[in-house]
Image (cartoon, helix red, strand yellow):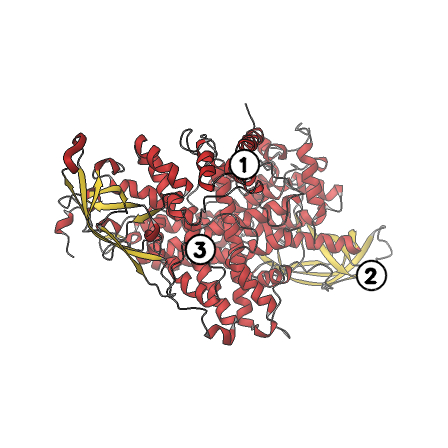
């Protein structure tokens, strides 16, 4: 049996052979990325034929490192983060073989950007209460007897929708059953007249997100992901991957937001006060302990024995970002009373770096709201990890259409 | 500060053949205590890894087996109701239980080399035992004898004392106030005991020690006291706890499960076991390892408090529903659970660093002691609060854990002092003039 080291060495050799036949400097970027996908070197933990080789996820780093070393183009992962982190695992878990063949390759190469059409103005934490309706209609010319769906409603907090070709749409297909049972999951073609995307300006001044208005937007039934009425279960897969993505990856000691606070502290002795010193040490220690907890979680994942500790990561990360950026802003003194730029901009990815502490302070407010509020996460920990009883509810057994609104 | 001896010790044991030592007292479970089976398993390049890389923080199978043996013993012999009865009777030290854990299960010799009759294990295993003693609020001098006093002696190679400790025949205590924190490397530090001239009839190597050490944990249960004595040179001295000139005065301790005493010496006979820099290193190593392993004990206290509270709020009904179904209660317990998960990672990191003598040990111990101490106090306070009225009574054991948590969080350096030490270690200097 091959050891992990043997397998990693074999993979690196595969990459080198691939690079020998595909010179990144001499090929158009997209062609190179398509070839890499077809060679099973895109995401090695995906199945053969879908860009991978069915290997453990841990081998991906060795492959990426070889491509980086060769100066190969990447697929701009920050821009297609929703596709890579949420759409792809959902399609892999619940999509048909045809859907996997159709969607995963252009998703990975970045040719087709994906966005997530879940939240609505009236459905945030209570996502299962959403009101966007999808109604089954006769297909266009009834070719092949295929039916379609017509979707109408309003979605909100949609990152990158203005650049997206596809949307992960969760819509109500049956209002006559309790809310969780009446949802269906679709891949929505964003490139059609029934889809209107408007920027949603946020309190930082920019617009990372959009509102998406659906007016009789059409979805062929072949783009339904999972069964009719199974949308809630499919959406759970997407949301679990979202929280993993937001919880963050491996960092070195004093990496991430704490690095900015520590650097500012060292550079500005004149700004130091005893109170800020105490806060900084606590935050530094908390960040380092959170880093160790993250490392322990990854060790468990790598060994195939994941614990529930991942649920803690996003809670801790949100609090640390908020407190570290508040610290940084206060340390900045008079400069902290200014802001770098209120212009309405449309960033394609989120970065806390490259902007001022005021931006970080404001943007981090969203960390405890987006991807599941900290309150909802505490409920999830209490009920799913600690096994505490659910609160009595009145909304889960009656038909969605009869709920008070 | 580096803790050289334990690191060399466990590294050498990892490669040694696992042949049983005849004549070493062991229970049937003793094979779990052998170190070879429990070395870290991730294959990380220990010794060469860069600062900030993370060793294996999971529990090995052997560590879990060791835990099960200790947990079963404590559940059988020392449930919290029995601890409460013991505290009520003013018989804090559970001598028979300690003898079973120390001698029969071999837990007193975890850190001691096999050549001295120990198990040749490491701080990783010692920390797992500490987690269980914390969960049980066990009234035994495990931390003070098997971890702190033992660590002080590891570098001395004192075969008599190490052999006695490993077999469980002797119990020792480092006679330093339990609030004391390891001094930073090179720091001058004065100890309250003075070294005087021997009597005419004293044998060679004997000196006479005088002075009072306040608030020593484990002193009442100890056969041997290890005293840092000021003089030229500074030394570490072993004193028979029952010798003429030694007085141990029990204090009323905040945590009655870990009794404290003042130790007064009036020309008590002491034998030098280390001197000068070696002695200073031995004392610092003992205090550092004590704080690191206490972090695991405190993590155990926190986990126990969380478990007890979760069980209780599932059962307790008010307003015709379990109180654990109220969001106000759930959110508090979710926060405790988060603190516990964080503390576990920090405590495991400290144990792993202590086990290999990692240069990052001072950072790891400071992080772990602060994180676990704070988590234990949070969990214990929430345990009392969420139990409501019953949690405020003497009859309910929640107060045992609260006192163990609060006292432990202050012992061997408060969380705040450990964070201050951390600030110096990671270059976060205080405001100018502070």
Q: Is residue B275 left or right of residue A161?
A: right
Residue B352 placement, left or right of B285: left
Disc 1 on helix, strand or loop? loop
Query: Residue A23 got which mark?
Result: 1
The image shows residue A244 at horizontal and vertical percentages of 41, 46
Q: Quadrant of the N terminus of chain A?
A: top right
Residue B174's image quarter?
bottom right
Residue B24 horizontal/vertical position (percent) = 67, 32
Q: Nearer the viewer, mark 3 or mark 2?
A: 3
The picture places residue A48, in percent across and down from the top left corner, at 42, 29
Q: Which numbered disc flags the more N-terminal residue, 3 or 1?
A: 1
Q: Which mark is residue B232?
A: 2
Chain letter for mark 1: A
User: Label 2: chain?
Assistant: B
**Label drawn at residue A316:** 3
- Spatial CA span between label 3 and label 2: 51 Å
Q: Are marks 1 and 2 on the same chain?
A: no
Please tell me if label 3 and label 1 are on a single chain: yes
> Residue placed farthest to the top in the image?
A1
Q: CA distance from mark 1 to mark 2?
A: 73 Å
Closer-to-camera residue (A275/B301)? A275
Point out residue A328 in the picture as x, y percentages from the top left corner: 50, 67
């Amino acid at each position: 049996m091959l050891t992990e080291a043997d397998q990693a060495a074999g993979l690196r050799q595969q990459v080198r052979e691939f690079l020998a036949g595909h010179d990144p400097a001499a090929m158009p970027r997209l062609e190179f990325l398509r070839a890499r996908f077809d060679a099973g070197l895109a995401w090695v933990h995906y199945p053969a034929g879908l860009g991978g080789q069915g290997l453990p996820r841990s081998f991906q780093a060795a492959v990426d490192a070889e491509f980086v070393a060769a100066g190969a183009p990447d697929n701009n992962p920050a821009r297609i983060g929703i596709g890579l982190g949420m759409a792809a695992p959902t399609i892999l878990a619940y999509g048909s073989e045809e859907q996997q063949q159709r969607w995963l390759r252009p998703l990975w190469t970045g040719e087709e950007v994906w966005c997530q059409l879940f939240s609505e103005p009236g459905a945030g934490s209570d996502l299962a209460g959403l009101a966007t309706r999808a109604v089954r209609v006769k297909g266009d010319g009834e070719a092949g007897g295929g039916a379609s769906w017509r979707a109408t409603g309003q979605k909100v907090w949609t990152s990158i929708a203005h650049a997206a070709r596809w949307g992960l749409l969760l819509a109500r297909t049956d209002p006559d059953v309790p809310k969780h049972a009446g949802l269906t999951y679709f891949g929505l073609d964003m490139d059609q007249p029934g889809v209107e995307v408007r920027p949603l300006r946020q309190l930082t001044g920019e617009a990372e997100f959009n509102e998406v208005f659906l007016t009789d937007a059409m979805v062929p039934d072949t783009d339904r992901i999972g069964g009719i009425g199974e949308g809630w279960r499919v959406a759970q897969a997407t949301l679990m991957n979202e929280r993993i993505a937001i919880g963050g990856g491996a960092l070195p000691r004093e990496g991430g937001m704490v690095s900015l606070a520590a650097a500012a502290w060292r550079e500005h002795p004149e700004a130091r006060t005893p109170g800020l010193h105490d806060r900084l040490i606590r935050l530094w220690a908390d960040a380092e302990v959170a880093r160790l907890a993250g490392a322990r979680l990854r060790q468990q994942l790598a060994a195939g024995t994941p614990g529930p500790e991942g649920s803690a990561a996003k809670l801790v990360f949100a609090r640390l970002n908020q407190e570290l950026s508040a610290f940084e802003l206060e340390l900045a003194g008079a400069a902290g009373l200014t802001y770098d730029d209120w212009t309405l901009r449309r960033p394609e990815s989120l970065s806390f770096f490259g902007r001022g502490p005021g931006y970080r302070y404001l943007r981090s407010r969203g960390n405890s709201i987006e991807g599941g509020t900290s309150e909802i996460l505490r409920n999830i920990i209490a009920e799913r990890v600690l096994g505490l009883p659910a609160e009595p509810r009145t909304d889960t057994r009656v038909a969605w259409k009869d709920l008070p609104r | 500060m580096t803790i050289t001896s334990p690191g060399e010790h466990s590294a050498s044991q990892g490669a040694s053949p696992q042949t049983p030592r005849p004549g070493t007292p062991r229970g049937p479970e003793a094979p779990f205590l052998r170190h070879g089976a429990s070395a870290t398993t991730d294959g990380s390049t220990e010794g060469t890894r860069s600062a900030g890389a993370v060793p294996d923080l999971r529990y090995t199978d052997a560590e879990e087996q060791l835990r099960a043996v200790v947990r079963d013993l404590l559940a059988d012999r020392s449930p919290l109701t029995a601890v409460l009865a013991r505290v009520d009777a003013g018989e804090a030290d559970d001598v028979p239980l300690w003898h079973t854990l120390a001698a029969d299960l071999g837990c007193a010799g975890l850190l001691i080399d096999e050549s001295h009759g120990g198990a040749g294990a490491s701080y990783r295993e010692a920390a797992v035992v500490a987690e269980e003693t914390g969960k049980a609020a066990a009234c035994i001098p495990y931390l003070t004898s098997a971890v702190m006093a033992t660590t002080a002696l590891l570098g001395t190679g004192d075969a008599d004392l190490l052999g006695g400790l490993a077999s469980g025949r002797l119990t020792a205590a480092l006679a330093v106030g339990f609030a004391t924190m390891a001094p930073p490397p090179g720091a001058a530090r004065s100890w309250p005991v003075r070294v005087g001239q021997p009597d005419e009839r004293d044998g060679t190597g004997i000196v006479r020690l005088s002075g009072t050490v306040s608030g020593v944990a484990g002193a009442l249960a100890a056969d041997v006291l290890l005293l840092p004595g000021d003089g030229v040179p500074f030394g570490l001295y072993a004193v028979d706890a029952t010798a003429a000139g030694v007085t141990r005065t029990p204090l009323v301790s905040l945590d009655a499960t870990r009794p404290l005493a003042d130790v007064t010496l009036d020309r008590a006979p002491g034998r030098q076991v280390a001197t000068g820099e070696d002695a200073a290193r031995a004392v610092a190593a003992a205090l550092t390892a004590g704080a690191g392993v206490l972090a695991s004990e405190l993590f155990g206290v926190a986990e126990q408090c969380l478990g007890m509270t979760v069980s209780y709020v599932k059962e307790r009904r008010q307003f015709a529903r379990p109180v654990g179904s109220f969001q106000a209660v759930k959110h508090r317990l979710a926060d405790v659970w988060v603190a516990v998960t964080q503390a576990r990672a920090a405590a495991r990191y400290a144990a792993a660093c202590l086990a290999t003598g990692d240069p990052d040990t001072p950072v790891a111990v400071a992080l772990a002691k602060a994180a676990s101490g704070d988590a234990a106090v949070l969990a214990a306070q929430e345990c009392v609060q969420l139990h409501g009225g019953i949690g405020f009574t003497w009859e309910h054991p929640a107060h045992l854990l609260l006192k163990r948590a609060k006292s432990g969080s202050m012992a061997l350096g408060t969380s705040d002092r450990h964070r201050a030490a951390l600030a110096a270690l990671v270059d976060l200097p205080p405001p100018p003039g502070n």
